[in-house]
Image (cartoon, rainbow, N blue to C red):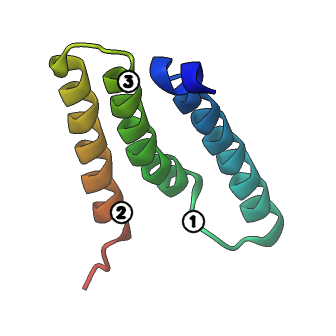
Amino acid sequence: MTEAFATGRIVDAILGLMLLELMVLIIVRKKTGRGLSTGQLVVGLAAGAALLLALRAALAGQPWQGVALWLIVALAAHMLDLKLRWPSQ
Protein backbone atom coordinates (compact mmCIF):
# COMPACT_ATOMS: atom_id res chain seq x y z
CA MET A 1 0.00 0.00 0.00
CA THR A 2 2.89 2.33 0.75
CA GLU A 3 4.17 1.93 -2.79
CA ALA A 4 0.73 2.71 -4.23
CA PHE A 5 0.80 6.07 -2.47
CA ALA A 6 4.49 6.74 -3.10
CA THR A 7 4.14 6.20 -6.85
CA GLY A 8 0.72 7.78 -7.19
CA ARG A 9 -0.86 4.52 -8.39
CA ILE A 10 -3.58 4.90 -5.80
CA VAL A 11 -4.87 7.75 -7.97
CA ASP A 12 -5.27 5.33 -10.88
CA ALA A 13 -7.60 3.20 -8.75
CA ILE A 14 -9.63 6.24 -7.75
CA LEU A 15 -9.88 7.38 -11.38
CA GLY A 16 -11.15 3.91 -12.27
CA LEU A 17 -13.84 4.22 -9.61
CA MET A 18 -14.78 7.64 -11.00
CA LEU A 19 -15.18 6.11 -14.46
CA LEU A 20 -17.42 3.43 -12.97
CA GLU A 21 -19.41 6.15 -11.20
CA LEU A 22 -19.86 7.99 -14.50
CA MET A 23 -21.13 4.86 -16.22
CA VAL A 24 -23.59 4.11 -13.40
CA LEU A 25 -24.91 7.69 -13.40
CA ILE A 26 -25.38 7.62 -17.18
CA ILE A 27 -27.30 4.35 -16.93
CA VAL A 28 -29.48 5.72 -14.11
CA ARG A 29 -30.19 8.85 -16.19
CA LYS A 30 -31.19 6.75 -19.23
CA LYS A 31 -33.47 4.51 -17.16
CA THR A 32 -35.12 7.18 -15.00
CA GLY A 33 -34.76 10.38 -17.01
CA ARG A 34 -33.54 12.08 -13.83
CA GLY A 35 -30.17 13.53 -13.00
CA LEU A 36 -27.54 15.53 -14.79
CA SER A 37 -26.95 15.26 -18.52
CA THR A 38 -23.99 13.25 -19.73
CA GLY A 39 -22.13 16.45 -20.60
CA GLN A 40 -22.67 17.91 -17.15
CA LEU A 41 -21.50 14.69 -15.54
CA VAL A 42 -18.37 14.53 -17.66
CA VAL A 43 -17.43 18.15 -17.00
CA GLY A 44 -18.07 17.83 -13.27
CA LEU A 45 -16.02 14.66 -12.96
CA ALA A 46 -13.29 16.09 -15.21
CA ALA A 47 -12.59 18.78 -12.64
CA GLY A 48 -12.09 16.18 -9.93
CA ALA A 49 -10.09 13.92 -12.23
CA ALA A 50 -7.71 16.76 -13.10
CA LEU A 51 -7.16 17.44 -9.39
CA LEU A 52 -6.37 13.77 -8.88
CA LEU A 53 -3.93 13.86 -11.78
CA ALA A 54 -2.23 16.86 -10.18
CA LEU A 55 -1.92 14.81 -6.99
CA ARG A 56 -0.53 11.87 -8.96
CA ALA A 57 2.04 14.11 -10.63
CA ALA A 58 3.12 15.47 -7.24
CA LEU A 59 3.33 12.01 -5.65
CA ALA A 60 5.33 10.69 -8.59
CA GLY A 61 7.82 13.54 -8.22
CA GLN A 62 7.09 15.25 -11.52
CA PRO A 63 8.26 18.85 -11.98
CA TRP A 64 6.01 21.56 -10.60
CA GLN A 65 5.01 22.57 -14.13
CA GLY A 66 3.24 19.24 -14.61
CA VAL A 67 1.34 19.69 -11.36
CA ALA A 68 0.46 23.27 -12.30
CA LEU A 69 -0.81 22.19 -15.71
CA TRP A 70 -3.26 19.72 -14.14
CA LEU A 71 -4.38 22.37 -11.67
CA ILE A 72 -5.10 24.76 -14.56
CA VAL A 73 -7.09 22.03 -16.33
CA ALA A 74 -9.04 21.44 -13.10
CA LEU A 75 -9.81 25.15 -12.83
CA ALA A 76 -11.01 25.33 -16.44
CA ALA A 77 -13.25 22.27 -15.97
CA HIS A 78 -14.60 23.69 -12.73
CA MET A 79 -15.40 27.04 -14.36
CA LEU A 80 -17.19 25.26 -17.22
CA ASP A 81 -19.09 23.16 -14.69
CA LEU A 82 -20.22 26.32 -12.89
CA LYS A 83 -21.28 27.90 -16.18
CA LEU A 84 -23.37 24.85 -17.09
CA ARG A 85 -25.08 24.74 -13.69
CA TRP A 86 -25.55 28.48 -13.07
CA PRO A 87 -29.22 29.52 -13.31
CA SER A 88 -29.94 31.58 -16.41
CA GLN A 89 -31.70 34.32 -14.45
Snapshot quadrant of residue 74: top left
Q: Residue 71: x, y in percent?
A: 24, 37
How far apart are the two marked residues, 2 and 3, measured between alpha carbons? 32 Å
Please tell me which of labels 1 and 2 falls first in the chain: 1
Q: CA distance from mark 3 to mark 1?
A: 32 Å
Q: Earlier in the sequence, mark 2 or mark 3?
A: 3
Q: Which mark is residue 36?
A: 1
Residue 37: give x, y in percent of width and height: 57, 60
Left or right of 37? Residue 69 is: left
* Extreme residue toward the right, this view: 31
Q: CA distance from mark 1 to mark 2?
A: 10 Å
Crowding at dot 3, Cα within 10 Å, few <14 / some 14-19 / many 20+, comes out as: some
**Residue 84: mark in rendering:** 2
Q: Secondary structure at mark 2?
A: helix
Q: Residue at x 53, y 31 (%)?
A: 11
Which residue appears farthest toward the bottom when viewing the image? 89
Element at badge 1? loop
Amino acid type indicated by mark 3:
Leu
Residue 29 appears in which quarter of the rendering?
A: bottom right
Residue drawn at 28 percent across, 79 percent down: 88
Of residue 32 and residue 73, the one placed in the foreground of this image is: 73
Question: Mark 3: which secondary structure?
Answer: helix
Vertical comparison of 78 with 2: above or below: below
> Can you identify the residue that label 3 sits on?
59
Amino acid at the residue labelled 1: Leu
From the viewer's side, name the closer residue of 77 and 1. Answer: 1
